[in-house]
Every structure is written in C-alpha cells, then in structure tokens.
Amino acid sequence: MEVAGNVISGLIKQGARKGLLVILCSFFVYCSGKPATMSQSIRGILTDASGTPVKDAIIMVADGTGPFSDLAAITDEQGRFFLPPLEVPGTYTIQINNNNNTNRHKIHITSTDSVIHLSW
Amino acid sequence: MKEKTLPVKNGNGSHAVKEAVTQVSEQGHSSSMSTAARAHAEMEEVKGYSLRRRAEGDDETSNTDPGEAVLITELDEPGSEVPASEAAPLDALFASYTELLPLVEAKTLDRQMREVIIGDDDRVQITPTTDFPYRAICSLKITAQDGSRWIGTGWLISPRTLATAGHCVYMHDHGGWPSSIEVIPGLDDDERPFGSFTATTFKSVKGWTKDKKREFDYGAIILPGNSRPGDATGYFGYTVRNDNFLKAAVLNISGYPGDKAGGNQQWFMALNTKSVSERIITYDIDTMGGQSGAPVWVKVGNTRYAAGIHTNGHGSGNSATRIVRSVFNNLKKWKSQGM
C-alpha cells in the first residue's frame, strides 16, 4: 500500500511539474508574441501639394489604436508640428484643419519613425 | 468656506453630519443649492470615503515655490455661478418688468435641457458663450518651452485659478513647464467677451511631472494678481463622488476642439458615463484635440460641480482624470492661491 501510495504521489508531482511547465511556456509564448509598445513623441511636417510648408494649421489625433492626449498642435512657419505622445507601433488617424477645411490621414507609426510627412 | 454641524433626521432617529456652507459675507455670493440638498450630498460623500494619507503621486509640483499643505474635509467645493454684479440688477429688473421673467425662465430651461441631452455623436456649439457655466470655460493657447504651440482648455475654479489637464501645464517632451499660456474665457470666434490673460505660473503633481502616470494627469494655472476673470465669469465648483453616483450620472463636457474654427469656438456634448475606475472616468462623449483640460461636470440641483478633467481620446472611450479626494485637496489649495 505504501509503495502504491508513493507511486501515485510521484505521478501527481510529475503531473504538477508538467502542468507548471506548460503554463510557464504558454506565458512565455504569450509575452514574446505580443508586440511591445512604447510611448513616443512624434514630430511632423505639413506641406501643400507643391511642397510649400503650411503655417498655422491645426493638427490633432482623431482616432487610434492607443490612447492619446486630447491636445491640438499648431504648425509653425516651416510647417513643423508635434503630435502628443503616442503608443507605437500603432495606427492613428491624424486630422488637419486649415482655414476651416479638413483633411485626414490614416498612418501607421513605428518606433523608428522620427518625422512624419503630411500633405495638405 | 466653513463647517457647521447640524442634526439630520433619519429612520433611526437623528445623527450629526457636517455641512459645508458658503460664507455669503466673504464672497458676496450664495450657492443656489438648498440646505437640505447640500446636507444630503454631504452625508453620501462622507459615508463613502475615509481620511487617509495622500498617495505620493499627488504631491504638488510647480514652476514656482510650492504652497503650504491644507487640511480639507469638504468633498463638495461650490463655485460661484452668479457674480454679485449681475444678481442684484436682475432682481431689480424683474421687480419692475415682470413680463420679462418668462423669457428669461424659458432661456434658462433651454440651457438646462441642453445639459442633459443624450445625443448620437452630436456636439453643439455654445454661442454666445456669455452664460454660466460656459463663460467660465477658457481657451488655452499654449507656448511650450521649445517654442511649439498647442491648443487646450481650462476652467475657472476661482477668480484667478484654472483647473486643466496636467499635460497642458507640463509637457515632458517639450521642456516641461510651458513658457506661457494665453487664457481666453468664453472665446467665441473673434469675440473675447472677458478679455485674455497671460499666465506663467503652473501647478501639477509628482505623479504627472515625475512619473508620467495618466492617473495623475491634472494641474492648474494661476493668473497674475491683477488678472481676475473669475470675478466676472463666476467659476466652477468641484466634487468627489462615489462610483454609483458617477455611473448613473449624465456628464457634460464643453471645450475648444481644434476641428472647429481653428479651436476658437466652444462646443458641448453630454452623455451618460460609460465606466468608472479608481481614478479615471470613461465616456463616449465626442471630443477632439484641443479639449484637453475641459471640465467634466454634473448638475446637482441647479449647481454645477466638476467631477473630472478631460484628458484623453481613444477609440474605446474618451476619458477624464477623476476628481478624488487627493485631487480635490490640490484643487482646493490651488484655488486658494488664486482668490
């Protein structure tokens, strides 16, 4: 009886170890398979069709895969602007308002994108 | 503000609760909230919360010398909705021309209804912006330390203090505290009915400025001593409310979205709360860039109390920093610095 008990106990422990191993492996696969995101400030330039910088346009994030601060940016004389920090990689809809006209761009931003170019 | 103790009857007899009352003689205004309603509100609030030490994230930071800590026990901080200069003449006017009263009442009713509209993705332009509470909501033209320019929203909580998002007064990637912010109460296209003011004193908390935690994304703007727009516009009260209250509440947001007339128009929307967490309120109210820092307010009786500060957009729901006790305490402190 004692031998049988030890065998059963051993099998249970072995099963528990295997179960634990499976859980750990699954967790590892889950973590490694999920793309890491980071919050990143994005710089941009707005130009018109001829490549001329657009000044005093309003730039804002209208939608996206991650949360974003509800600030709006104003372009400077060289058409430069910043977006609020965004979780990257991610896909965002950027809205431009200039002289009461609206233009939208859906863009995918990665951590290697240092400057985005938008056309008006 | 001061406290007094008064007995309140309930089914088991009477017990004492603390009631916050406005010193009419001090500010020249009185809250429109009835004593009974206020006592009821105070009972609910005190029951749901206990005094405890603030989390370190709520420790104040500023681009000027920090103020002294203030012990706060109130959970509703009334605003000032009717400047004294307007209240008395109106009473006198109605006494002489009673036929005008229905017109004003109709206008007031219309405004009250607009604050409970539950619409489908509909924002409404507020114009003119000279009625309360819209005149106490301000367009912010922000110039960061690195020269970049931004649009945000703030709301007066005292004659010289505005509450807003932390990221409107501290921008981690753009030099920290802004070099200046132009504050324009009730901006309405080209109209600046209460003028504009330049601010260089800003407040926030460590949880935002040091740790960049979204839960601590709130701050304040203190206007110079000679800039007191709140005397003319009135200012918001603010409140700490429990989960059940907020989940059942209709939330009102009005601010300056950048997709409308270059951020120079005030737009409003109201909708029920979507969800509430410990420090965040989430809703499907439409917002756009430029509305960061806008008040998220509820109506209690005829009084408006901000319960959150709008900060974030997201496809799954826009959200506000919830006014919890520690946020309330800091707002109270910053308010006192702008009286």
Image (spheres, rainbow, N blue to C red):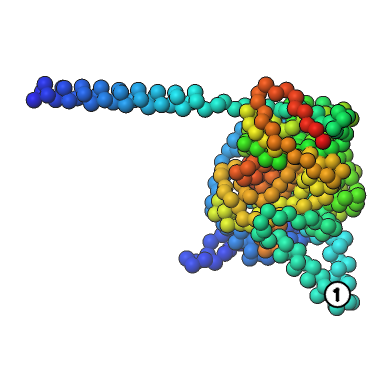
Identity of the residue furthest to the left in this view: A1
Q: Residue at x 76, y 63 (%)?
A: B111
Please name the residue shown 84% across and 64% down the image: B87
Residue B290 or residue A26, whichever sits in front = A26
The percent position of residue A102, horizontal first and vertical second, equals 80, 43
Q: Reply above or below: B245 against A94.
A: below
**Between B9 and B131, which is closer to the camera in this rendering?**
B131
Instruction: Examine the image and state in which quarter residue B55 appears.
Output: top right
Between A67 and A107, the residue placed more toward the observer is: A107
Residue drawn at x 88%, y 71% as measured from the top left: B92
> Mark 1, chain letter?
B
> Can residue B295 be seen?
yes
Q: What SS does tag 1 mark?
A: helix
Q: Reply above or below: B238 against B178.
A: below
Q: Tag 1: residue type?
A: Leu
Residue at the front extreme of this rendering: A50
A56 sits to left or right of A72:
right
Name above or below for residue A4 compared with residue B109: above
Residue sitting at 54 percent across and 54 percent down? B244
Q: Position of residue B27 (x, y in %)?
A: 80, 55
Q: Is residue A95 left or right of residue B19?
A: right
Q: Is residue B288 above or below residue B8?
A: above
Residue B43: % across, % down: 57, 58
Q: From this viewpoint, is residue A81 visible? A: no
Q: Which residue is mark 1?
A: B100
Report the number of numbered marks: 1
Q: Is residue A85 left or right of residue B196?
A: left
Quarter assignment of residue B117: bottom right
Across and down, in percent, residue B285 comes to 67, 51
Crowding at label 1, few (<14), some or many (≥20) Cα neighbours within 10 Å?
Answer: few
